[in-house]
Amino acid sequence: MFSLLKRKYKPLNRIEVSSLALHHNYNYLAQSSGLAIAPALKSNAYGHGLGLVAKALDPVGAPFFCVDSIYEGYELLKEKIKTPILIMGYVDPDNLKGKKLPFLYAVSTKEMLEAVYRYQPHAGIHIFVDTGMHREGVPMDALPAIISQIQSMKGVHIEGLMSHFAAADVYGDLTKEQVKNFQIAQVLFHTSGIQPKWIHMANSLGVLHYKKYRGKIGNLARPGIATYGIDPLNKNTVLQPALTFSSTLVQIKDLAKGESSGYDFTFTAKKDMRIGVVAAGYNDGVDRRLSNVGFMKIGETFCKILGRVSMNLTMIDISEIKDSKVGNKVYVYTNVTLAKNSFNASAIMVDTTAYTLLVQLSPLTKRIVV
């Protein structure tokens, strides 16, 4: 038994992340926008693997990486990442006490500003302004009070001024109002003698549509999903998707006309057919809503998902594949933008977003950078 444990384990499921694609996307976003790029690596790097992506992008010289929590920041420290780390989410003040932490902090309230200044006085601070999304951030009418608080803090390090688009792809009245409010915030800070090094508001869509906002939203952007090669609008053809998720065909069986397959018998064969059982289900990141509508791919053939996606297994139609066999590689999600089983195409089928499908990928699935 011990000799078996020493052998190299061969997983049935595997996620591959292309370092070349990540670098291509980073350079494209920077060059096409003229902005500095601080990639968003929160939420396990949008399912790609926090440590793997950080290591791949560490050499590019980004001003900082964006994560959500101190926990994610610590994960990057364990990987010996040299790029500075901006914690964008809420931080419990108790987690700032004790020792000096090498992080930057996005601050949305006067209480958070006071806590960072008191317990981590060396830390760079990015003031987060609520320009109209009405989620996190300092409300516009509270900016004068925050500015006064900053002015009373000797040696405070205000490194950035930031906000976030609610709908960067729609240049409607509400988006225009957000841009206007962010400009007002910049003026208030500058006329008060506070000169942040980084001014940033744009997310992925803000970068891809930056020409509409040129000169108004700062000198830096925080793209998330575009860093990984996906345009939420599915229009950009330059970005290169970085991730492929493959599984394994573990059983093949014939299904006679009239026979049903899977939980609740939601699929019934209209003709004799051959089905394959794939070793990936909704626990692994195959969205259950893809039942009976989604696709996987074997070789060059797209195979429709049949019946309910199970927790660890999914059935697919392999009738058109004459030489299928147990052990075949099955592409659950592909890195080809227009493929039937791309993240965008799969998301459209089930009325969700590529973001949702990506972050559902199990963190237990083996990930490698290729």
Image (cartoon, rainbow, N blue to C red):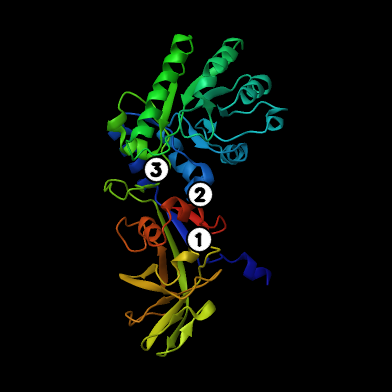
Residue 214 image point, x, y percent: 30, 27
Q: CA distance from mark 2 to mark 1?
A: 14 Å
Tell me the quarter of the picture where residue 311 sits: bottom right
Disc marking residue 285? 1
Query: Which residue bears the numbered disc 3?
Result: 227
Horizontal side of 124 relative to 189 (left or right) equals right
Q: Is residue 109 above or below residue 289?
A: above
Q: Which class describes the residues within 10 Å of circle 3: few (<14), some (14-19), or many (20+)?
A: many
Check disc 3 and give the amino acid type: Thr
Q: Are marks 3 and 2 in contact (CB under 8 Å)?
A: no
Q: Secondary structure at mark 1?
A: loop
Disc marking residue 49? 2
Check disc 2 and give the amino acid type: Gly
Q: Is residue 7 visible to us here?
A: yes
Q: Secondary structure at mark 3?
A: helix
Q: Is residue 244 above or below residue 164?
A: below
